Amino acid sequence: MTTDRDPALDPARDLRVERLIPAPAATLWRCLTEADRLRRWWVPSPVEITDLVIEPQPGGRFFTHMRLPDGGEHRVEMMILHAEPQHRLRFTDLMTAGFVPVAQPMFGFAAEIALIAEGAATRYVATARHARPEDASRHREMGFHDGWGTVADQLAALAPSFDD
């Protein structure tokens, strides 16, 4: 069931990036939930994804292993909370696959990517809701808007090339 309910953003705890992408929601959904497509845009270039697992159902695993330009590596284990095909994907770093709580999450957030059809295009709305204002502040200072904005732009450039 699709719901357009969008709780008001709390400027102390919530961060958002939005883009109008010239591709249908069905294409963006595949780019978001199929590992071979997701790995092509999910991290800002020149960071590379060396391994990625996404299981788009509640309790599913969402894992990325990234290689940074300096040779460093970064692993992120998250869990899918909700998957509504072609409309919305929610995930969190507060738990890992199977609803296992995380002792020390990276950011302490639940994220949502909403896909809203607008004619032949789709509005991509990525929201990260943090448990504490200090978590949101740290995420903002680490470059949330630049990073999540860059990946949204990478998706916008890539998605129209798929012939779905």
Image (cartoon, grey):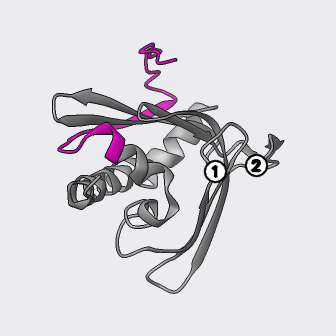
The answer to if 9 sits in the magenta stretch is yes
Q: Is residue 20 left or right of residue 91?
A: left
Residue 41 as seen in the image, left or right of residue 110: left
In the image, what residue occupies the spot 49% across and 78% down?
68
Q: Read off the magenta span.
A: 1-27
The tally of labels here is 2
**Compared to 3, does 25 lie above or below?**
below
Q: Residue at x 43, y 25 (%)?
A: 11
Whether pointer 2 and pointer 1 mark residues with C-beta atoms closer than 8 Å, the reply is: yes
Q: Residue at x 52, y 39 (%)?
A: 136
Occupied quadrant, residue 57: top right
Mark carried by residue 97:
2
Vertical placement of residue 87 versus 153, above or below = above
Q: Amino acid at mark 2?
A: Ala
Any magenta on residue 29? no
- Where is residue 110? Give x, y as percent: 59, 36
Q: Secondary structure at mark 2?
A: loop
Estimate the x, y position of residue 51 in percent, counting from the top left. 59, 72
Q: Which residue is disc 1 drawn over?
A: 55
Mark 1 belongs to which amino acid?
Answer: Glu
Q: 11 or 87: nearer the eye?
A: 87
* Residues at marks 2 and 1, CA–CA distance in whole angstroms: 9 Å
Closer to the camera in the image, 116 or 12: 116
Q: Is residue 59 above or below residue 47?
A: above
Residue 144 visible from this viewpoint: yes
